[in-house]
Image: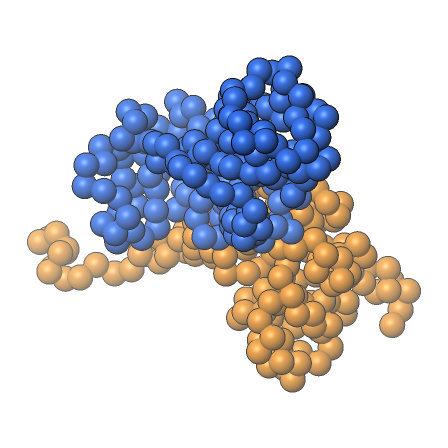
Chain colours: A orange, B blue
Amino acid sequence: MTNQTDKRRMHVLVTGGGAFGSYVARDLVDKGHEVTLLDEDSSVIAELKERLPNVRLVCGDACEPRILEEAGILRADVVVAATSDDEDNLVIALLSHKEFDVSRVVARVNDPRNGWLFTDWWGVDHALSAPDAFVPMVEEFVASAPQHPAEAPPETR
Amino acid sequence: MSAEGHEIAIIDKRADAFERWIPENFVGLKLKGSGFDRELLERGGISEAHAFVSVTNGDNSNIVSARVAREYFKVPRVIARIYDPRRADIYRRLGIETVASVVWAVGRIRTLLERLPYEEESSYGNGEVVLIRTELPPHLAGRKVGDVEVSGEIRVVQITRKGRAFIPGEGSVLTTDDNLRLAVSADALGLLDKLLGRG
């Protein structure tokens, strides 16, 4: 590795080993970052061991400060709160920011109705909300779709 | 609290919770949804609420809604329940009062188990006040009655000494082998344990 890539190698802590979290972890490792993934379900961790050999895996509750420390949060440049529970992601973001001074926190919004909470008030630097990202695309797609002939004005029939 | 005339709004994720747990004569608002849904909280009148109580079975949802109530809606009193006592620290740092239900229940069970030395003679109302009979613990001999009394919580109502009963004054001195009858508020039983050296 060159010096330049060394400098940009980040330590990222991902919490939540579901489809989203594990996909993010794999991608970041492939890009050359150091990644730790935390999940409280030991069967999830066991399964990921085979799929993500280059990711450091830790089993435990990410909402508990002691577990976050064990997972190396004090060395983390970025925390990705990626569980499927919004309240868990908010608590993880808050702890990362307030208790451990992590400089960048990215959090996943599962239910867009909770999106208003995912701001710096809860220690979130960047919110990832799939529905909010998709809706404009769907709107655009709907607007540009051809109209059903039965609904079209008579002159265009 | 609703029956006492307080104005209550309840939020629960499950609609069946209302049917199962809320009595038919409940007159408050019943709202189905999440405890940190801003729109729902506003419909429940959180902006004018004097108190907010978060007692879901998820510690993290209690943290989130309690913090929302306190910091965003500025509700003056916010209380949350936690199961995992290790999280109490986080709540405290966020300025939220907690009731750790597991710790509380364990403490209460211990108190009940260890309170065998007392004889509970009678209880009044719904058990808010009890009359207890106990021998004077040796370490209190020579102390004044006022030393074991707490205004509004513990009163020595009667002493039997050498077969003779009397009603003591605050300045009466306790003697070895005294047999006491105390009127105690149920909330102060823990305190009584401490005073009698059983805590």
Residue A125, how many percent across, how many down? 64, 45
Q: Quadrant of the N terminus of chain B?
A: top left
Residue B187, how many percent across, how many down? 50, 34
Based on the displayed image, in which of its 4 quarters is residue A57 positioned?
Answer: bottom right
Residue lying furthest bottom: A50
- In the image, A50 versus B17, the foreground residue is B17
Q: Quadrant of the C terminus of chain B?
A: top right
Is residue A45 depicted above or below A102 in this figure?
below
- Total number of numbered discs in the rendering: 0
- In the image, B110 versus A103, the foreground residue is B110
Residue lying furthest front: B163
Looking at the image, can residue A117 be seen? no
- In the image, A37 versus B140, the foreground residue is B140
Q: Residue at x 86, y 60 (%)?
A: A7
Q: Residue at x 50, y 61 (%)?
A: A84
Residue lying furthest right: A3
The answer to whether B90 appears left or right of B153 in the picture is right
Based on the displayed image, in which of its 4 quarters is residue A50 positioned?
Answer: bottom right
The answer to whether A49 appears left or right of A87 in the picture is right
Q: Residue at x 68, y 33 (%)?
A: B176
Looking at the image, can residue B50 be seen? yes
Based on the displayed image, in which of its 4 quarters is residue A48 positioned?
Answer: bottom right
Residue B27, how many percent across, how many down? 22, 32
The answer to whether B195 appears left or right of B156 in the picture is right
Q: Residue at x 29, y 41 (%)?
A: B31
Is residue B62 depicted above or below B68 in this figure?
below
Residue B44, how many percent across, how many down? 33, 33
